[in-house]
């Protein structure tokens, strides 16, 4: 007996990591010393104050029951306090904030709540693959917005045809950006809001890396810009900020109608975030100033190590990022994205991510993640130099 997957699942693009995963596993089996700079998963542990909050909350019987689908009132109030403190924006916890099982879940569900078959969803490319796949699952049509180095990795809003805007239901954005590490400007967000008002589409800003920045720089929240709340929402996560990727807790803030629609969809598909995890999330947000600067300093130290290594490699087109924990690099020696990552693995035992994994516009680039210790990152650069990169 055999079973065929649904048409919507078969529409997803090929999974580019299959061959690379095979080569990585072969290298591990040969006993090679692999340096993994491929995955966007923090290698540092969750801060103890957050773990302790979870441990205490897990002992409370009331927390063992079904949680509220939109999140505990205390959690939503803490999110509101975070936004007021960090970004100077006030939200109503009852109508403008909801919890998420990580921001990925919210991104995946949002098109199901608002996109009808045939609707267009504007998707940044290169970009997080879930923007594209969630659109396909909802029956929508992804329309790529190329992010080019010449345009500071911001979409060219004027290059999108009016006929496409007329069919657009949703636009995904993501700054600080994965994979390019670019930041958005206030002017860009203002122009996005103007387009959304004119054409009546929802803007969904993925802010998973909003609090990961270097050199004392603070990234701009979409919600800080006047008019943003009227046209969309911001999806945030505790995953990258607090080293909590496995905990699966995030939140969405913004337009109450969009929040309500997403909450209604989720009510039919999941049962919310475990209350004890939300209590840990409260501890994380409340202790932001006590834990986040040290986490970001670790990434900044690793970035400096990589920058020093790149200097030795003589890569003159290297641009040091100001946030996220990614570095977006042009491939070397005329190699394609996939060939570059394959050769780095085979010749240097260094795992990276090919740019085309994030869409066709990522071809010619590859991504490294600062998710290894500084000395290992520097060693990876030394291996690349020895291999002729």
Image (cartoon, rainbow, N blue to C red):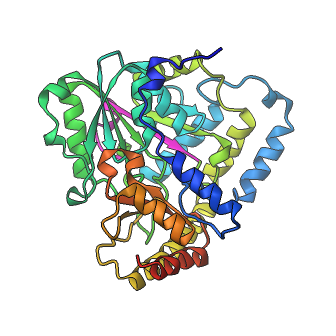
Answer whether residue 232 is visible to the viewer in this image.
yes
**Depicted 73 relative to depicted 129: above or below:** above
Q: How far from the left and from the top, in percent, is residue 109?
A: 49, 26
Give me the residue at 62% from left, 17% from top. 2
Q: How far from the left and from the top, in percent, is residue 159?
A: 14, 41
State the residue in front, 125 or 47.
Answer: 125
**Depicted 311 relative to depicted 149: above or below:** below
State the residue in front, 369 or 233.
Answer: 369
Give me the residue at 24% from left, 24% from top. 200
Which quarter of the image is occupied by the C terminus? Answer: bottom left
Q: How far from the left and from the top, in percent, is residue 72?
A: 65, 30
Q: How far from the left and from the top, in percent, is residue 135?
A: 39, 27
Give me the residue at 19% from left, 36% from top. 194
Q: How many numbered markers are drawn?
A: 0
Q: Which of the 4 image quarters holds residue 297?
A: bottom right
State the residue in front, 82 or 57.
Answer: 57
**Depicted 242 relative to depicted 161: above or below:** below
Q: Which of the 4 image quarters holds residue 151?
A: bottom left
Q: Magenta stretch: give its range.
A: 224-238
- Is residue 316 a member of the stretch shown in magenta? no
Which quarter of the image is occupied by the N terminus? Answer: top right
**Depicted 118 relative to depicted 106: above or below:** above
Give me the residue at 43% from left, 44% from top. 128
State the residue in front, 323 or 341.
Answer: 341
Answer whether residue 44 is visible to the viewer in this image.
no
Decide if residue 217 is on the left or right side of residue 162. right
Q: Name the outermost residue toward the front.
A: 1
Decide if residue 165 is on the left or right side of residue 251. left
């Amino acid at each position: 007996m055999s079973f065929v997957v649904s048409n919507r699942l078969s529409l997803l693009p090929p999974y580019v990591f299959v061959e690379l995963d095979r080569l990585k596993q072969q290298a591990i089996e040969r006993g090679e010393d692999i340096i993994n700079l491929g995955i966007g998963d923090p290698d540092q542990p969750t801060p103890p104050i957050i773990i302790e909050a979870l441990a205490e909350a897990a002992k409370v019987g009331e927390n063992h029951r079904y949680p509220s689908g939109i999140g505990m009132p205390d959690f939503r109030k803490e999110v509101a306090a975070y936004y007021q403190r960090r970004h100077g924006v006030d939200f109503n916890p009852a109508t403008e904030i909801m919890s998420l099982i990580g921001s990925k879940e919210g991104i995946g569900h949002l098109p199901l709540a608002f996109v009808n078959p045939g609707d267009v969803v504007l998707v940044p490319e290169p970009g997080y693959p879930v923007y594209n796949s969630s659109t396909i699952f909802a029956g929508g049509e992804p329309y790529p917005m190329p992010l080019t180095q010449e345009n500071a990795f911001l979409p060219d809003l004027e290059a999108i045809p009016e006929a496409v805007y007329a069919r657009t239901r949703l636009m995904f954005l993501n700054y600080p950006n994965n994979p390019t590490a670019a930041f958005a400007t206030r002017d860009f967000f203002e122009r996005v809001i103007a387009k959304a008002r004119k054409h009546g589409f929802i803007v969904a800003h993925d802010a998973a890396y909003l609090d990961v920045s270097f050199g004392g720089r603070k990234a701009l929240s979409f919600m800080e810009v006047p008019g943003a709340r009227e046209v969309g929402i911001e999806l945030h996560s505790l995953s990258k900020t607090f080293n909590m990727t496995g905990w699966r807790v995030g939140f969405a803030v913004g337009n109450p109608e969009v929040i309500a629609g997403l909450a209604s969809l989720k009510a039919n598909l999941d049962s919310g975030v475990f209350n004890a995890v939300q209590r840990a999330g409260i501890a994380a947000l409340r202790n932001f100033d006590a834990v986040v600067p040290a986490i970001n300093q670790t990434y900044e130290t690793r970035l400096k190590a990589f920058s020093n290594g790149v200097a030795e490699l003589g890569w003159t087109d290297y641009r040091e990022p100001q946030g996220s924990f990614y570095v977006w690099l042009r491939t070397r020696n005329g190699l394609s994205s996939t060939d570059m990552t394959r050769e780095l693995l085979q010749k240097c035992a260094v795992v990276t991510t090919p740019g085309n994994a994030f869409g066709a516009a990522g071809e010619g680039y590859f991504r490294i993640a600062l998710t290894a210790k500084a000395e290992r990152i520097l060693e990876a650069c030394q291996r690349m130099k020895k291999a002729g990169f």
